[in-house]
Image (cartoon, rainbow, N blue to C red):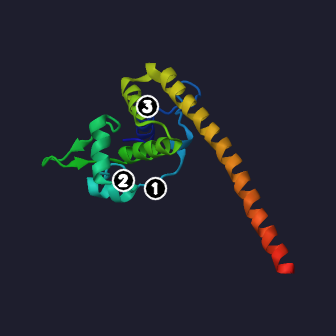
Amino acid sequence: MTVTQTQTQTQAQTGTDTGGDAGELRTDACATAEVAHPRPDGQDRYTISEVAAFTGLSAHTLRWYERIGLMPHIDRSHTGQRRFTNRDLDWLAFVGKLRLTGMPVADMVRYAELVRAGDHTFEERQELLRATREDVRRRIDELRSTLAVLDFKIEFYADARRASERF
């Protein structure tokens, strides 16, 4: 598989695309960030325990993600064991980012369904991500306000301690 095919596959799976000329490979910041995979493409057949160790997710969580439709179809070995790929690791990294945003699981599953549905869902995917971005921005503003209160209180106690040391 060529690099272009791999990147296009990753884009299709993660639903990432940021513009450019027709025929030009287009990726987003998540997809273009250099992620060191444990194995090169083509030799990337990971067991569930290897993926759990690499991602920090439990095997139970990985199975649950698959069961609820958050993970795409995971290949199986001839004995029925799950075999994850680098593309699956990339998807899990993206899902991890969505989790950090506070996106509800139902919305993450909906996003995954839209990705699987194809290119005609770009607009709906974009709207889901925009709404999430707005939620993140609101939370960042709340956290900045909270940080300002904490800074004020820390400085208050530092001033009080300095004042008491003078006497």
Comparing labels 1 and 3, the label whose residue is closer to the camera? 3
Q: Is residue 44 left or right of residue 141?
A: left
Q: Give SS at disc 1.
A: loop
Q: Earlier in the sequence, mark 3 or mark 2?
A: 2
Determine the residue positioned at 40% across, 32% down.
106
Near-viewer residue (107 or 77): 107
Q: Which of the 4 quarters of the picture holds residue 66?
A: top left
**Left or right for 69, reference 159:** left
SS for callout 3? helix
The quadrant of the image that shows the N terminus is: top left
Q: Which mark is residue 36?
A: 1
In the image, residue 162 sits, relative to residue 139, either above or below, namely: below
Residue lying farthest to the front in this orientation: 167
How many residues crowd around disc 2 within 10 Å: few (fewer than 14), some, or many (20 or more)? some
Q: Which of pointers 1 and 2 indicates the residue nearer the eye?
A: 2
Q: Position of residue 79 (x, y in %)?
A: 12, 49
**Is residue 60 visible to the viewer in this orientation of the structure?**
yes
Q: Name the amino acid, label 2.
A: Leu
Q: Are marks 1 and 2 in contact (CB under 8 Å)?
A: no
> Is the residue 25 above or below the residue 122 in the image?
below
Tag count = 3
**Residue shown at the point (33%, 39%) measured from the top left:** 71
Question: Which quarter shows the C terminus?
Answer: bottom right
Q: Nearer the viewer, residue 157 or 59?
A: 157
Would you name the residue on which mark 3 appears? 107
Q: Which residue is mark 2?
A: 57
Residue type at numbered disc 1: Ala
Q: How far apart in space, not on screen, are marks 1 and 3 (Cα)?
A: 28 Å
Position in image of residue 83 (x %, y %): 25, 48
